[in-house]
Amino acid sequence: MIADAEAGKIDIIITKSIQRFARNTVDLLQTVRQLKEQGVEVWFEKENIHTMSGDGELMMTILASFAQEGSRSISENVRWRVKKRFEKGIPNGHFRIYGYRWEDDQLVVIPSEAAIVKRIFQNFIDGKSRLETEREFATEGIKTRNGCQWLDSNIKKILTNITYTGNLLLQKEYITDPITKHRKKNRGELTKYYVENTHEAIIDKETFDYVQQEMARRRELGPLANKALNTSCFTGKIKCCICGKSFVHCIRHDRGGSEVWECQSQKVSNRRCSMKGAVPAKVLHEECAAVLSLEEFNRGWCSLVDFIIVYSKEDIRVTFKDGTEIKA
């Protein structure tokens, strides 16, 4: 609209009321003044205000302020009613959740979708990563309710949603500003309401709690917890001295399946660095074992290491968590 006004395509704008034109008084005045500079008049039909008239802006400001406060008051009343519903264990509206449908005010299990939910939880308990489940579903042609591919984010929402235990956690989000309607995740700013046995469970509470603990454990381990990724105990610890990127674990099938570590920049187009060559995994193991005078490499050795800087295949420097640096 502003662009059309600046291009001279608009002479007058007719709007139902001040409330329909802008969210708050500041936005209203800024927009009206900007249009006025372009010679475009705004007529508010309900209030019968013409912005080009002498007292138009004064009346508009007064009425807009009243409208804004009225909107804020209505919002506060709505929040109070929602809060009372939460205290009684009643959700605010019918939210969408895979595995259930609404019948009146009751969540009812959809058997076909519930089977997928159970499979997602079981896969995770069996040690599979979310990425492995995503690939498994893609291979088998299993789609979401909307007919889309399952993604890691979808699977995570399933695994972390307590609704599948037959209980509800209410007020997980809230509106921060009644004018902008901006929503924010509730991280303890407001009271959350936990209501038990509101509907049929798909997953028992013990299984759900175990999965949350296992997710926390895998999060602590980082990439090492994801068997679907090509990781090792060195993942994330080896850094390039030139570009600062991490070294990644690679298997060179063209060279008999030899394992090497090379700078991440070498594998991404347009992000080359001058680090030459790769470090064979065997050499890395031998050098690291030699640092602590070990006969052979032990994966537990990495728990003592903060990071490793590679200057060349012959110059690898290890920094331990106590700050000690040793050249391998």
Image (cartoon, grey):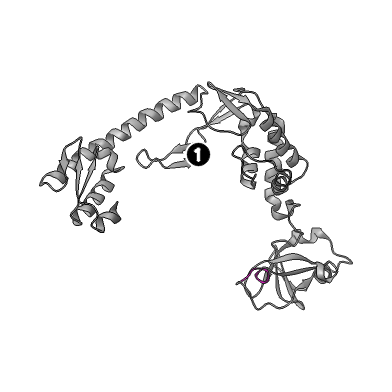
Q: Residue furthest front?
A: 9
Front residue (pair 147, 27): 147
- Can you give x and y, in whole percent of width and height, for residue 158 in the image? 64, 38
Q: According to the image, label 1 marks what residue?
A: 186
- Can you give x and y, in whole percent of width and height, for residue 108 in the image? 61, 24
User: Quick check: 120 left or right of 162?
Assistant: right
38 lies above or below 179: below
User: Quick check: 168 left or right of 292?
Assistant: left
**Which SS class for mark 1?**
loop
Identify the image quadrant of the C terminus.
bottom right
User: Quick check: 244 left or right of 7?
Assistant: right
Q: Amino acid at mark 1?
A: Asn
Rendered residue at 68%/50% (across/down):
220
Quadrant for residue 309, please give it. bottom right
Q: Does the magenta portion include 169?
A: no
Circle count: 1
**Magenta residues?**
265-269
- Can you give x and y, in whole percent of width and height, for residue 129 in the image? 72, 47
- Can you give x and y, in whole percent of width and height, for residue 5 in the image? 25, 54
| Visible residue check, residue 87 | yes
Quadrant for residue 224, please give it. bottom right
Secondary structure mostly taken by the magenta-highlighted segment of the chain: helix
| Visible residue check, residue 290 | no
Q: Residue furthest left?
A: 54
Front residue (pair 304, 56): 56
User: Quick check: 12 left or right of 142?
Assistant: left
Rendered residue at 31%/34% (across/down):
71
Quadrant for residue 107, please give it. top right
194 lies above or below 243: above
Few, some or many C-alpha atoms within 10 Å of disc 1 (few <14, some 14-19, many ≥20)? some
